[in-house]
C-alpha cells in the first residue's frame, strides 16, 4: 500500500498549492498554539513552527507523510506575522512600503522516524505605497489572515516591484523543493 500524504495546515493557500501538483492528499489541521521565542532567528522560528504543526498531526498518523509549514515576513530584522487588527495591517504595510523584506517559509515533513525540516527565503521589494492605497487594500479584508498583511497572489500583487526566490514559498509552500524533499524520504510521485 502506498503511504498517504497529509497536509497539516488549515491554510487554504497551501491546499490550493498542493492541489496544483495533482497528487492525492488529505488535510488534518493541528490546533497548535503558535508561540515562538522572539530572540531566535526567523529561520529557526519558521522551521520549528512547521515541525510542531507536523508533529501534532504525525503522532496519530505513523504510516503517512505529514507536511507542516509556517510563513513569516521579516522586515529590518522584525518578524511580522498576521496582523492583529486593521490598524496593525496599516502600519505593517506602511513599514514595508518602498523597501525589500524577506518572506521565510519553514517546512517539515515527517514519515515514521524520518524528519525533513528546511526553510526557503524569498526577497520581495514593494513599490512606494500611498496611504489611500494601503487603506483601500486593508478594507478589502485580504491582509487579515496573511503574514506581513498582504497576499502576493491577490490584490497585494499590485505592490510588488521585484521578487527573488520562490513565488510559491511566499504564498505559503515552496512547492518544487517540498516535492523533492518528499521524494528524498521515499514518497513516490
Ligand atoms: C506573505 C504572504 C503570506 N500568505 C499567507 C500564507 C499563510 O497561510 C499565512 C501565514 O500564516 P501561517 O501561520 O504560516 O499559516 P496559517 O495559519 O494560514 O495555516 P496553518 O498554520 O494551519 O498552516 O500567510 C499568503 O497567502 N500570501 C502572501 O503573499
Image (cartoon, rainbow, N blue to C red):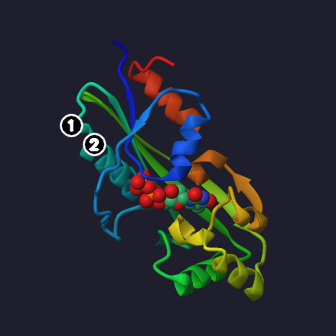
Badge 1: residue crowd in 10 Å (few <14, some 14–19, many ≥20): few
Q: Mark 1 and mark 2 in contact (Cβ < 8 Å)?
A: yes
Vertical relation: 104 (above or below) 65: below
Comparing 149 with 39, the one in front is 149
- Residue at point 65%, 82% (across, down): 94
Residue at 64 percent across and 57 percent down: it is 123
Residue 129 horizontal side relative to residue 151, left or right: right
Position of the N terminus, as image quadrant, is: top left
In the rendered view, tell whether residue 34 sits above or below residue 5: below
Q: Quadrant of residue 159?
A: bottom right
The residue drawn where x is 62% and y is 67% is 150
- Residue 87 lies in what quarter of the image? bottom right
Name the one closer to the observer, 155 or 183. 155
Q: Name the residue under label 2.
A: 57
Is disc 1's CB within 8 Å of ligand 1?
A: no
- Mark 1, residue position: 60
Q: Position of residue 142 (x, y in %)?
A: 62, 69
**Seen from this angle, which residue lies furthest left?**
59
Crowding near pointer 2: few (<14 within 10 Å), some, many (20+)? Answer: many
* In this view, 176 is above or below 34: above
Left or right, 138 with respect to 55, comes to right
Tell me residue 24's x, y (percent): 48, 27
SS label for mark 2:
helix
The x, y position of residue 134, in whole percent, is 70, 81
Amino acid at each position: 500500500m502506498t503511504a498517504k500524504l497529509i497536509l497539516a495546515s488549515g491554510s487554504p493557500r497551501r491546499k490550493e498549492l498542493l492541489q496544483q501538483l495533482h497528487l492525492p492528499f488529505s488535510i488534518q489541521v493541528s490546533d497548535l498554539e503558535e508561540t515562538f521565542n522572539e530572540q531566535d532567528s526567523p529561520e529557526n522560528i519558521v522551521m520549528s513552527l512547521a515541525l510542531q504543526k507536523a508533529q501534532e498531526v504525525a503522532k496519530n498518523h505513523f504510516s503517512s507523510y505529514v507536511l507542516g509549514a509556517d510563513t513569516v515576513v521579516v522586515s529590518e530584522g522584525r518578524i511580522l506575522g498576521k496582523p492583529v487588527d486593521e490598524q496593525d495591517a496599516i502600519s505593517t504595510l506602511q513599514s514595508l512600503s518602498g523597501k525589500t523584506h524577506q518572506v521565510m517559509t519553514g517546512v517539515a515533513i515527517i514519515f515514521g522516524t524520518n524528519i525533513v525540516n528546511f526553510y526557503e527565503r524569498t526577497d520581495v521589494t514593494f513599490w512606494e505605497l500611498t496611504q489611500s492605497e494601503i487603506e483601500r487594500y486593508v478594507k478589502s479584508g485580504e491582509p487579515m489572515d496573511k503574514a506581513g498583511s498582504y497576499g502576493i497572489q491577490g490584490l497585494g500583487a499590485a505592490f510588488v516591484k521585484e521578487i527573488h526566490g520562490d513565488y510559491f514559498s511566499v504564498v505559503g509552500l515552496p512547492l518544487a523543493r517540498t516535492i523533492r524533499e518528499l521524494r528524498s524520504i521515499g514518497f513516490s510521485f
